[in-house]
Image (cartoon, rainbow, N blue to C red):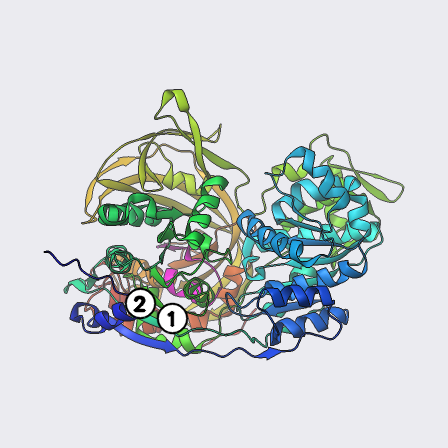
């Protein structure tokens, strides 16, 4: 009789891994976070007995310290921001004071804002289950694009708690505030969950949506209180105050328990000693995940991009199809339709799905059950994001494992060599710029549509009279009797996206089955240039589709299912010109600058890359129009005469090599995805004729990322130099300056020159 191999639990698998030389040889750091006991305090004496009894029936007989502190601070009239790790019971920080207020006055209204529909849906389900047990008449509803029209009137008139997202608030609630009179008159609380998500373009837009919301509240005579919750970031109080325009009380006395968590830094083996190229992080993540999944251990794998998610998913589905069945492992990312995402979330909770491969879409606090293992295929790009992803494993106090598999990029290799950077450093600051002129003008149009502006009125703390005069000249507003009125026929909010630099998304249409042509996803225009061009391989839930036609004007991509052994990757050609220099620091052998730039980007060619080996097996041209972007940039320039000893080719190697390092190191100092901050080296910059490296914000008008780089140039260059010096390669490799011959020493020489005598700012 053949003995079946017994499946191992998490303890057994860890024990096995510790004795496996193939695994232990690649471990750069193994950090174990011990169990943490809960810090419990009694229910506040003022808390309604019905709430206490209901909590007791849920086996909750006391509150965590942060929950009790939040309740008391809100009761005392403070605006609060509660900051604790993932799965620490943050939702009670707002549920308790809100339900308490409704128990005293049934007219009380609260607005819950979640960054995604998935989170809103998750919270509504949990809240309704609890409220029905409590016996307090609390009417809570979600209000989003999926809410049927016959329910919407009920929500507007009778909803004590309206659960929505910023996009819906922006485009459907605020413009129609006259239908929400009783809601705004009685609005007492505004809850903003997952505060740390509101950064960059999205956060800058949302801060203005909040200004519009408070303006409407003032019109109806209400002064709501803010309750914000956030994962750990460096500046939660500052971010909450920027977002809401209100002074905040910070609550960070986390009282939640935590199970033992093993945090493993895994560096794939070197497969090319000369170029110091490591085995693909994607392939190593696949091998590690297969080990856990084949033993039935529920696992989440995070990948850095939509394409990587689909590649990993197709690998894993092939590997475990015979053991587990293909539906037991699913993908999860932006672009999937809502019903598909709900099905995946439910499958994870009830155990039907044991593996999920996701982009950072699942960093957020959607309840996806008791995952035991988290594997990251590459460093997520920020300390805060890494902790969020790690928090998805061991959410219910059990032992858990987090494995971060490094890529060959300088950023990943830096983190591998410096685990103390990750474990000892506080998470990054979240940056927003609500007063970005492009964002502000768009939001002022929406605000003027909602209510006329009075002469002398401010928008938050911003003086807006000049902008209102400009909009009057453009015949968007009409000035009469000291007020500005909206005079355009169009409805502004529908044309303004909160989340994207480009205002319109491309719809992806599957025409494999002529009898059942269907929409399977969507993508922003900028991404579509490199991911949905003609002949691109688009991956969706592990299924391959070839793009047959991208109609950029109609914003439609027509795809057909195919089976090929490669995926595609596209190149973007960028031209950049300086329009205006706002700040400059002169050095003895160069200068650092910051200002407004114009960027022209065009997708040029695409490569076909073979699965498994990742070899380049072909290429083709891309025929798409050029996209123009006005934004802000920071730059460093060297004086031409100091570089005469270098040949043209050597100088280009040095610039390209240093740009490669900066592309990965600079995001360490600015809380952003590396894709948000683009790097362009120029042999002769148009504005100065000098060799220059630019770092620019990938969003119209800039959102403050490159300005932060300008302020921290000295530190950025020091870290870039350290990343180059610490790399064991001789001449240059993908882990430092890229694969350019001799680029390593040239890049280091450029930094040494720039670190010469310091000048003065002017």
Q: Which mark is residue 189?
A: none
The image quarter containing residue 704 is bottom right
> Does residue 756 show up?
no
User: Is 431 placed left or right of 75 in the picture?
Assistant: left
Which residue: 46% across, 63% down?
388
Which quarter of the rendering shows the C terminus?
Answer: bottom right
Which residue is pictured at 61% across the width and 54% down the height? 129
Q: CA distance from mark 2 to mark 1?
A: 8 Å
Q: Is residue 428 shown in magenta?
A: no
Horizontal relation, residue 213 to residue 455: left or right: left
Extreme residue in the left direction: 1
The range drawn in magenta is: 663-683
Q: Is residue 698 left or right of residue 162?
A: left
Q: How many marks overall?
A: 2
Mark number, residue 10: 2
Quick one: SS at disc 1?
loop
Pick the residue in front: 353 or 413: 353
- The answer to whether the residue labelled 2 contacts the one labelled 1, judged by CB atoms less than 8 Å apart, is yes
Local crowd size for mark 1, using a 10 Å CA cut-off: few (<14), some (14–19), many (≥20)? some
Q: Percent from the top left, x then y, of residue 414? A: 33, 70
Residue 108: image location, x then y, percent: 78, 55
Quarter occupied by the N terminus:
bottom left
Q: Secondary structure at mark 2?
A: helix
Residue behind mark 1: 399
Task: Compare marks 2 and 1 and give the one earlier in the sequence.
Answer: 2
């Amino acid at each position: 009789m053949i003995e079946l191999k017994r499946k191992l639990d998490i303890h057994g698998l860890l024990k096995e891994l510790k004795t496996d030389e193939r695994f232990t040889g690649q471990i750069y750091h193994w950090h174990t976070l011990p169990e943490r006991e809960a810090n419990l305090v009694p229910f506040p004496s003022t808390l309604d007995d019905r709430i206490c009894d209901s909590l007791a029936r849920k086996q909750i007989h006391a509150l965590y310290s942060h929950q009790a502190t939040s309740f008391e601070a809100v009761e005392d009239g403070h605006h609060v921001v509660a900051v604790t790790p993932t799965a620490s019971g943050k939702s009670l920080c707002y549920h308790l004071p809100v339900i308490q207020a409704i128990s005293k006055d049934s007219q009380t209204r609260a607005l819950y804002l979640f960054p995604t529909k998935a989170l809103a849906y998750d919270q509504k389900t949990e809240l309704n289950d609890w409220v029905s047990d409590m016996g307090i008449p609390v009417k809570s509803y979600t209000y989003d694009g999926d809410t049927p029209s016959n329910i919407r009137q009920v929500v507007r008139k009778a909803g004590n708690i309206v659960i929505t997202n910023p996009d819906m608030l922006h485009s459907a609630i605020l413009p129609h505030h006259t239908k929400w009179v009783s809601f705004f008159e009685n609005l007492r609380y505004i809850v903003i969950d997952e505060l740390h998500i509101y950064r960059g373009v999205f956060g800058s837009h949302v801060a203005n949506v909040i200004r519009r919301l408070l303006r409407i509240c003032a019109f109806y005579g209400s002064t709501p209180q803010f309750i914000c919750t956030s994962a750990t970031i460096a500046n939660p109080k500052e971010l909450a105050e920027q977002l809401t325009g209100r002074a905040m009380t910070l609550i960070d006395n986390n009282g939640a328990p935590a199970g033992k968590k093993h945090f493993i830094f895994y560096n794939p083996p070197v497969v090319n000693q000369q170029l110091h190229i490591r085995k693909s992080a994607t392939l190593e993540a696949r091998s590690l995940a297969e080990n856990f999944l084949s033993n039935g251990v529920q696992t989440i794998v995070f990948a850095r991009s939509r394409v990587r998610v689909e590649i990993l998913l197709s690998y894993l589905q092939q590997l475990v199809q015979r053991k587990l069945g293909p539906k037991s492992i699913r993908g999860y990312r932006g672009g999937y339709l809502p019903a598909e995402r709900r099905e995946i979330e439910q499958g994870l909770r009830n155990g039907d799905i044991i593996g999920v491969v996701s982009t950072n879409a699942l960093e957020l606090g959607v309840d996806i059950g008791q995952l035991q293992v988290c594997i990251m295929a590459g460093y997520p790009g920020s300390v805060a994001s890494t902790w969020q992803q790690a928090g998805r494993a061991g959410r219910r106090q059990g032992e858990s494992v987090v494995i971060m598999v490094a890529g060959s990029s300088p950023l990943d290799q830096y983190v591998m060599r410096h685990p103390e950077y990750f474990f000892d450093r506080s998470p990054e600051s979240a940056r927003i710029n609500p007063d970005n002129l492009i964002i502000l003008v768009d939001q002022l149009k929406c605000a003027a549509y909602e209510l006329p502006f009075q002469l002398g009125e401010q928008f938050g703390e911003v003086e807006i009279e000049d902008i209102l005069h400009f909009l009057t000249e453009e015949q968007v507003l009409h000035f009469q009797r000291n007020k500005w009125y909206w005079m355009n026929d169009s409805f502004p909010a529908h044309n303004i996206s909160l989340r994207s630099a480009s205002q319109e998304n491309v719809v992806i249409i599957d025409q494999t089955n002529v009898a059942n042509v269907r929409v399977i996803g969507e993508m922003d225009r900028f991404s579509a240039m490199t991911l949905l061009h003609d002949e691109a391989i688009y991956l969706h839930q592990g299924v391959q589709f070839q793009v047959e036609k991208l109609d950029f004007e109609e914003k439609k991509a027509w795809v057909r299912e195919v089976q090929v052994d490669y995926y595609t990757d596209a190149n973007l050609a960028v031209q950049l010109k300086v329009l205006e220099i706002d700040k400059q620091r002169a050095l003895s052998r160069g200068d650092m600058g910051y200002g407004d730039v114009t960027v022209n980007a065009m997708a040029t060619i695409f490569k076909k890359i073979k699965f498994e080996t990742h070899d380049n097996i072909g290429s083709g041209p891309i025929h798409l129009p050029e996209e123009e972007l006005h934004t802000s940039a920071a730059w460093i320039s060297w004086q031409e005469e100091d570089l005469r000893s270098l040949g043209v080719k050597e100088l280009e190697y040095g610039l390209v090599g240093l740009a490669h390092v900066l592309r990965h190191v600079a995001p360490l100092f600015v809380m952003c995805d590396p894709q948000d901050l683009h790097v362009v080296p120029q042999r002769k910059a148009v504005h100065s004729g000098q060799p220059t490296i630019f770092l620019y914000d990938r969003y119209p008008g800039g959102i403050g990322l490159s300005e932060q780089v300008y302020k921290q140039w000295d530190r950025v260059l020091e870290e870039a130099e350290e990343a180059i010096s610490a790399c064991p390669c001789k001449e240059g490799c993908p882990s430092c300056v890229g694969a350019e011959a001799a680029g390593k020493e040239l890049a280091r020489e450029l930094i040494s020159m720039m670190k010469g005598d310091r000048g003065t700012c002017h």
